[in-house]
Image (cartoon, grey):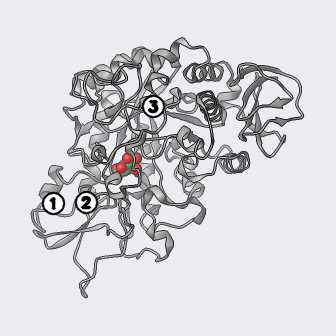
Amino acid sequence: MEWWREGVFYQIYPRSFKDSNGDGIGDLNGIKEKLDYFEYLGIDAIWICPFFKSPMVDFGYDISDYTSVDPIFGNIEDFKSLIDQAHKRNIKIIIDQVYNHTSDKHPWFVESRKSRDNPKADWYIWRDPKPNGELPNNWVSLFSGSGEESVWTWDENRKQYYLHLFAKEQPDLNWRNEEVRKAIYDSMKFWLDMGVDGFRFDAASHFYKALDINAKKGPQIKKSLFQSSRDEYYWDPFTARPETLMEVENIVKFMNKYDNRASVGEISSDMGLCLYLLFTIQGRFNIAFNIDFLEKLSMNAKNIRSLVETLDTFFGNRAWPSYVTGNHDNRRILTRMIEGLNVNYEDKKRISKLFATLLLTLRGTPFIYYGEELGMEDTYIPKDRVMDPWGKALWPKPGRDPARTPMQWDSSKYGGFSEVEPWLPVNENKSLVNVEDEMKDKNSVLNFYKKLIFERKNHDSLRIGTFEIIDLDDRILSYKRNGEKPVVVIMNFSSESVKINWNGGKVILDNYGNAELPYLRPFEALLIEI
Ligand code: GLC
């Protein structure tokens, strides 16, 4: 069985994981220092967000050189040594590849914007205004705060517009140009030759565009990326082009020349599950993020059940599902789940453990977002500390910084992340929520994750077994994972005690510490061996 199906992935936002050189920003050597931690938890693979040379307008998602490390994070030797050390411990490393766009400081764009006839003139998406002076089309930037800003920015030099789906400092590459494709494949080759175990392809559903289609006017187009709603099933005019799907097949063929590498696509569109399936069926990406547990779904037992059942039916053996409960673009799961509830620290721990149980027992590859395993929450960021370009556009609404604050290693002033004031503030709850103290506490969220991951390793059923819903109560989600050692998972997503009709089996994990079946207490989660 492929490692990317069975393994547990852990997402690292490198600026915030561990600062090894005292500049308040995390780096590659910081990650290397913490490899013991992944072993402790039982992590199989880490995904590191971009650490390549970048002006950092979008904190690394605006790349100015695809094959070099930004000095903030270290150098290429540091990365080689990180791969080497991780591989010695059987930990795989996948890295982000941002090929929808570059930075406007990338030498390719600097050249492209010089004239209409230089060798790279066609490497980006340049257009004249329409004869009546209008913009080439009516598309709205995914980073638009007001929902009005265009994807087109005027360049005085070329007297033309260039397209950027995200910030204006992130011009989109022209994938229809053969030389561009060659340069992209060369960069993939560079990292594959070095020994990375795979890629996470950023914004992968946007590679090719159909510029002649105007976006449908209506409420949907007022929404930008992080507000879009899955329910509307709105076909974004610029995403999900058949050309992109064909290109994904080429990418995967290219990666298959190497042994054992994994491809993970970031597919963002209002097409939801359909698109997610299209991008992962045979010959396409191994995995695409299923982002329904992020901002999309109201997380009660009924909604989660309907999603996981649909997913299981449609995906079947055609494609392999995945689950995430948090990432660097969304609010943290615990923060979202306790909104409007009157909860104390013990309740928070229980709720974190409940969602850990869901993430690590569904049929599909789980991705843990750094700090989730501690029960980290969003951090309040005062206006003068806002860093995220999207957060600046949205102010006073919070952007993405609150979920990107430093990892909490211990209870010291800067949470053991750095010796100096970090680039984003450390959450005050570091005094309770931190690795050092949670390692010592057998009832901590951290040790619950560790036990869950251990049970996954111990039960084939949890990793690759089939999935079967058990009907108990509307407030309860319960399913069986079949296999040699079947496991039943029972989770109460409500704040009420529920009596269920269940007997038998041996409880192997419980977020209260002691099961009281047939009663399930508020937010209780159980794993039962049968
Ligand atoms: C993806 C990344 C996000 C980034 C955007 C532009 O959605 O997850 O962080 O801002 O692409 O590269």
Total marks shown come to 3
Compared to residue 74, the image places residue 301 above or below, namely below
Image-quadrant location for residue 20: top left
Give the residue type at disc 3: Tyr
> Dot 3: few (<14), some (14–19), or many (≥20) neighbours within 10 Å?
many
Image-quadrant location for residue 113: bottom left
Give the residue type at disc 2: Lys
Give the residue type at disc 1: Ser
Q: Secondary structure at mark 3?
A: loop
> Which residue is pictured at 54% across the width and 51% down the height?
295
Q: Position of residue 242 (x, y in %)?
A: 47, 62
Q: Seen in the image, is 250 located left or right of residue 156?
A: right
State which mark lies toward you, 1 or 2: 2
Dot 3 or dot 2, earlier in sequence: 2
Q: Which residue is mark 2?
A: 168
Q: Which residue is mark 3?
A: 370
Q: Indicate if the residue with disc 1 has its beta carbon within 8 Å of ligand 1.
A: no
Tell me how far mark 3 sits from mark 1, CA to CA: 38 Å
Query: Answer yes or no: do the residues labelled 1 and 2 have beta carbons within 8 Å?
Result: no
Q: Is residue 202 visible?
A: no
> Which residue is pictured at 34% across the width and 27% down the height?
195
